[in-house]
Image (cartoon, rainbow, N blue to C red):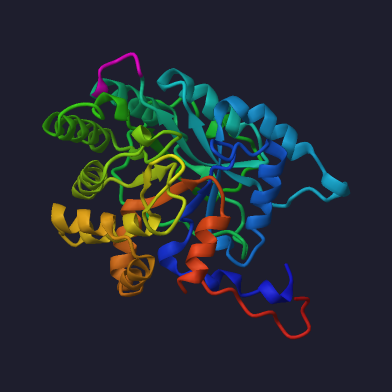
Amino acid sequence: MTAAHADAPAAVPPVLRAMCDDAALFPPANTPMPEAVTAHRRYHAAWYRALIGSFVCPDTRLEELRAALDARPDGAAPPVEPLPVVLVVPGGSTHVAPAIRAALAEPRLSLRGVEVVADHDAPCAEGVRHAAEALSAHLPTARPTPAPTSSAPSAPTSSAPSAPSAAPPIGPEDQPEDQPEETEPVYGAVELPRACWAARPWNDEADLLSAVLDVLAAVGQRAKLRTGGLTPEAFPGTAELAAFLAGCVARALPFKLTAGLHRAARYLDLGTGAVHHGFLNVLVATERATRGGGPREIVEALREPSAPALAAAVRAFTPEQAAAARARFVSYGTRGITEPLTDLVTLGLLTPPAPAAGAPG
């Protein structure tokens, strides 16, 4: 690290730390694995590194990830720190245990979370329950934590209910002997099946959403909602997203969003006709919900089109309000870092550090 970036963590305020999980492997970016891994390492060495969360990888591409870790571009030395990884398990509950075993067997990975798609071969709430219970049964009780360094951002503290761990097949005896003693939990999240309710009347939609959130609260796993895709139908409406945010806050459920949150404020994509939600819209709406705001206030925050107005609202958060909002809205998956980073710098929520005297520009 250069002297110019020695004070980099201070450039990212706590309310934004570890907010952006790196989902470059997924559509629409579809970045090749070697390029994606190299870019993620670069992000974690940059002045804005505390903004960046984990590298998101499907369990089906772990072998490809290992090969990318083996590569040494231009004879570079191997990285000192393990790559922080969140596994996505699209195959459902039966794929959870082997995915976790494979990730824990690779010492160059630091497993931070496992996000599983709800089982499709069961009714809505039951599919979510199967996935959540698989996470509770198979998640390790703790994960190895690399020795603290200036490049490791702190994740927000979660107040989710403790997930049960009934005779997990992956325990301390299964983990490598050279792991550090200091440990942290690996989180689990279930991606909710929007197809179960997206085409139904609103009353049915709200009831089904409430039912699946009840399941996650009872089992003790996080919620994950897909907020975009390649078609307008893949984007939840404002009422649906507001109900999801309010439901998670009411149940003290941490949640993650993925897809579509490219910019700070909501906008219309003229190419697809889809209205994209903004990540600052979500942050402000979540804060409103944690303070007891009703549906109208949450919807208004989600519909706010002005990025400067949203940035002003975030600046007005007290430390306690910011912490409460991030305890619920833990992170979101983004196809790239350039768009959110540019928006945050433009809005004055992030300030690049000035180069140190004598440092290269």
Q: Tell me the quadrant of the picture where the C terminus can be found.
A: bottom right
Most extreme residue toward the right, as rendered? 75
> Is residue 233 left or right of 50 when viewed as pictured?
left
> Is residue 35 left or right of 255 when viewed as pictured?
right
Q: Is residue 92 visible?
A: yes
> Is residue 177 left or right of 196 when viewed as pictured?
right
Q: Tell me the quadrant of the picture where the N terminus can be found.
A: bottom right
State whether residue 28 is above or below residue 310.
Answer: above
Frontmost residue, 209 versus 347? 347
Quarter of the image for residue 138 reads top left
Quarter of the image for residue 33 reads top right
Q: Is residue 171 visible?
A: no
Frontmost residue, 348 versus 157? 348
Give x and y (percent) for residue 318. Answer: 30, 73
* Marker count (numbered): 0
Q: Residue at x 52, y 42 (%)?
A: 143
Find out whether residue 3 is within the magenta segment.
Answer: no
Give x and y (percent) for residue 36. Answer: 66, 43
Most extreme residue toward the front, as rendered? 270
Give x and y (percent) for residue 274. Answer: 38, 42
> Is residue 40 left or right of 241 when viewed as pictured?
right
Find out whether residue 122 is within the magenta segment.
Answer: yes
Magenta region, residue range: 120-124
Give x and y (percent) for residue 57. Answer: 57, 36
Frontmost residue, 53 versus 99? 53
Most extreme residue toward the bottom, as rendered? 357
